Amino acid sequence: MQRPIPGVQQVQGREFMYIESAANETFHQLANSVSAVCPLIAIPRSGGAGEEKVRITLNNGISFMGISYKGDIEGWRSRFVELCKASGRKYGFIKEGRLCLSDGSSPLIEELKISFEP
Amino acid sequence: MVPRPQSRFPFLAAGRIWLAAVLLWLCGVLPAGALHAPDGIPISPKTRVGGFGALPAGRLPLREQFGSINAPGKWGCGYEIVSGRREWKLYGPDINGVYGGANGTGGFEAVSPYLTLFEPTISDFRGNILGVITNGATQWNPARPTGYGAVPGYRPVALGNGASISLSSAWRGRWADITGYHSVGARTYDPVSGHWLSFDPAWNGLDPNGFSAFGGDPINFFDRDGRVSQNLYADQATHDQIANAFQDYVEEESWNTPGMNGPAQPGSMAYLMDYVNYFGWPADSSQELQYVGGHSSIQFGNFADNSSGFSLLNTMENTDARDYALQQWNEADWHSGWGITMKVASGFDYGVNTLDAGANMIPIVGGVKSVTETAVKAVIEDVSKSLAEDATKAITEDAAKSTVETSATTWQEYERAIQNMYGGPATFGARQYQAVVNGELVNGVADNVATIGGQSVAVEAKFVDDWAASIRNPASPIGNMPFAADAQAEVLSQAQAYSAAFDKVIYHSNSPEFIQYYSNVFKNAGIGNFQFILTK
């Protein structure tokens, strides 16, 4: 049975985010690049982040890695948002059946390609 | 798998080694000796991070080699160890216009997180570090310094908690250590109470009780070395000179260098003032606003457009240093991004560039890692004692209820068997995580991950061949060896990382003793979201 798309259902204490990412980019490559691209961004006070084993691909081929974080949610969110801004990546959050992206677009989830990893 | 500290800058490349050699050579020119501020007051070794050294006989100060210098010829550099990595600090003239004249206050001009990148700081008139320019963009410091320290809730992050030097040096360019205090020369300063922790060894009339700071007026007075409160900002002529220089600079120089982001635009003074107003910066007065960003200004430019540094290099009288400097200046990697020269705000003091770094190196040893390890070992020692007192503590209820057989005989077989219990191993990338443990970012890779009941779960397999001889058992014959203690600490630090990053952690182990021991270790360390399952 296919699991729900991370972010469609709210999970208390955890936030789900989608970050534009090459298909072969690993979570560590993504997360470690924050310190390189935004060396001054503060380290979150607590918690952690990881990959959600899901990718969403837009109709134009742009692929997003699903990640989530807990603990200092604002701290983790700013970390990844700053990375995206500094490196020109799009990012987004799922809201009301749509993937609301940083470029202002908000395609319906059901119209996008969802790939779950094993 | 073991979480590993994040490596932020995985180089120097071999081709840049010479660059390190140049800086080290330059620093070697100015050995750590008896240090004195220009007025003769010895500078405490504790605060020599700026490095203001006496010169060897017969050696021209690097600053003087450049000419056109209005201050005694000392240009400082120093480094500090941040998350195990050496970061260089470059110092220009202090707030009184003299190199080292205020024990580094206001002189902190730039950070070099690694030797091919320099990040100029943006400081205000009182030496507070408001931001830093990195990768062509301005990063504002989230801390909001006041005269005495910082606004509650916006205090600088302590150096050693993963903060950068710039972030933690918001107040007067001095970083806070993990205690939250600042070392200022002879004494330690508490920014929360606005008092020194010890009596003034010299005593000064402005602080007659010996503990109060800055004569009760941190706006107009500062104590640069913990022994005397002085009005370092008293000279109105200096005020005007700095302000005018900055205004001129904004108007005349190329703040709008292509590719430069942030406030470095024409009218940037207004930008800075808007920023201060918007964020409620605790501006001391309208005059303070006027000087935001005015203490030192940084001239960026691409090398081809900026010949001042190059010309000044050619004027160096020390030919060895000049050759090194020119070689460095012309190195493609060096200025491929930005040629950097610094224009000190006195208005006529061009030409200080990153090459003339040379002074004392003050390594700050220790740091979070050793503190963390010590803490972890202490926890384990405590748990060992408690177990000795209460040997009846049982295997966790969960483990007792759910014994599963794997028939594995090696840790590899065991790990695979555990992975298969969750539908096979997730991809390597999907098992990666990052967590904050004791204020430090760590990377880790779980043996497996799963989503159970909507929760993100880490799965870890712990195969123990012989608990009585295991290095993870403090009571084993080798259990108190240093490497064994490290291995035991590692189990806990891994659990802390799992606990931070995942909603739940499931440990499988074939050893009831391992489960018994470490379930107590984890509980005593305050980890609550783990579950042990005895899996033979």
Image (cartoon, rainbow, N blue to C red):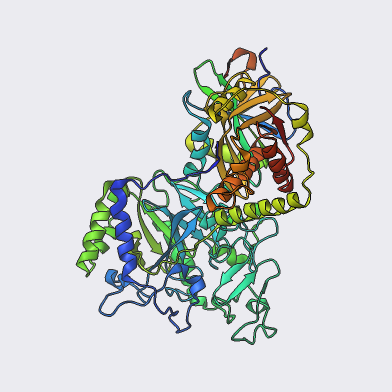
Q: Is residue A97 left or right of residue A102?
A: right
* Residue B45 in view (yes/no): yes
* Corner quadrant of residue B190: bottom right
Question: In what quadrant of the picture does the C terminus of chain B appear?
Answer: top right
Residue B43, position as x, y percentages in the image: 48, 78
Q: Residue at x 55, y 30 (%)?
A: B411
Q: Position of residue B406 (x, y in %)?
A: 63, 22
Q: Is residue B289 left or right of residue B52?
A: right
Q: Locate residue B409, reporting x and y percent.
A: 57, 27
**Does residue B140 appear to the left or right of B456 in the view shown?**
left
Q: Is residue A88 above or below residue B451?
A: below
Q: Is residue B111 visible?
A: no
B418 is higher (above) or lower (below) than B307: above
Quick check: B139 above or below A94? below
Foreground residue among B137 and A22: A22
Q: Nearer the viewer, residue B533 or B31?
A: B533
Q: Nearer the viewer, residue B383 or B429?
A: B383
Which quadrant of the structure image shows residue B161? bottom right
Number of numbered discs visible in the structure rendering: 0
Q: Which quadrant is the N terminus of chain B positioned in?
A: top right
- Image coordinates of residue B505 in percent, x first then y, are 68, 33
